[in-house]
Image (cartoon, rainbow, N blue to C red):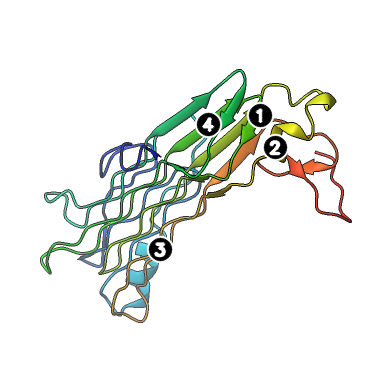
Amino acid sequence: YVRADWRGCAQDNGPGAVEQITASGMPCSGAGAAHGGSGGAGGIRSQDESSAGQCSGHFSEAYFGPNAFYEGSGGTSGDSGKRTGGNGGGIVWLTSSGDTFVNHTVVSADGEGGKFQDMTQVGSGGGAGGSIQVVTTNLIGNGQFNVRGGPGSSEGGGGGAGGRLVVNYLKGYLFSSYPDMSYFWMGGADLHGGLAGPIATNYGQAKAGGNGTSDHSPCFPGYTGTFCRACEPGTFKYD
């Protein structure tokens, strides 16, 4: 395993973190942090529809660039004194001028789930997934890349967003590189946002984190996706 899980921004910190707010005098549960997608809003124990709307509108937007430079942000704590939000995922860069083998293993930079300690606090948000960047000539194996957001805690914690995955093939601009550069890659990736934490209310439900995003070097016609795999029979794509 190559893991940078929970190695990003600490709870309540980072460009995709938001402060806890109150609605009609009651605290909203902590929101999930953003990164490759938007963070999930926290819920509220109130049955008042107006209060629920204030909480559901309080979340952070995605932030990322063309490369995988950023850590995942930390989720909002249900009680700032207890620091119960989830940490964000860290950063993993795999760089090789030749072949990169990721076989029977997982490379991950997942966010941490929000934590709920006792009924004196409200729910806490999950941390956002971090960043993985692969720079190589050929990618080989059946491994897995994960930049998943952490789930919100019980009592309405918002889910953390998925992170950022970037795959750049050094010779992807050469037709002679195809199909070898991705032909022997049979692995996958998971960029899902974290689930929202449950809460007993009709209106103030928390939201799941948005899925993360990916980018890649341009694929030749007939190849598509993050890993520039050959298109399915009967389909064709110009990038």
Q: Earlier in the sequence, mark 2 or mark 1?
A: 1
Q: CA distance from mark 4 to mark 3?
A: 25 Å
Q: Compare residues 179 and 123 and report the one nearer the observer.
A: 179
Residue 30 x/y as whole percent: 28, 57
For the residue labelled by badge 2, is the local secondary structure a helix, a strand or a loop?
helix
**Callout 3 touching callout 2 (CB < 8 Å):** no
Q: Identify the residue at the far top of this view.
A: 97
Q: Nearer the viewer, residue 211 or 166?
A: 166
Indicate whether 97 appears above or below 123.
Answer: above
> Disc number at residue 90?
none
Query: How many other residues sit within 10 Å of disc 3, few (<14), some (14-19) or many (≥20)?
Result: many
Residue where numbered disc 2 is placed: 182
| Residue 133 circle label | 4
Mark 2 to mark 1: distance in Å? 6 Å
Amino acid type, residue under disc 4 in the picture = Gln
x, y percent for residue 10? 26, 39
The answer to whether residue 70 of the structure is visible from this angle is no
Question: Quick check: 136 left or right of 119?
Answer: right
Q: Are marks 2 and 1 in contact (CB under 8 Å)?
A: yes
Front of the two marks 1 and 4: 1
Q: Say whether marks 4 and 3 touch (CB < 8 Å).
A: no
Q: Quadrant of the N terminus?
A: top left
Question: Left or right: where does residue 148 sit relative to residue 24?
Answer: right
Observer-nearest residue: 99 or 91?
Answer: 99
On the rendered structure, is 10 left or right of 107? left
| Residue position for label 1 | 138
Q: Nearer the viewer, mark 3 or mark 2?
A: 2
Residue beneath the point at 16% across and 50% down: 80
Give the residue pinned by disc 3.
Answer: 195
Instruction: Return the x and y of residue 44 as percentages of the image width and height.
Output: 29, 69
- Judge the density around disc 2: few (<14), some (14-19), many (≥20) Cα neighbours within 10 Å: many
Secondary structure state at the residue bearing disc 1: strand
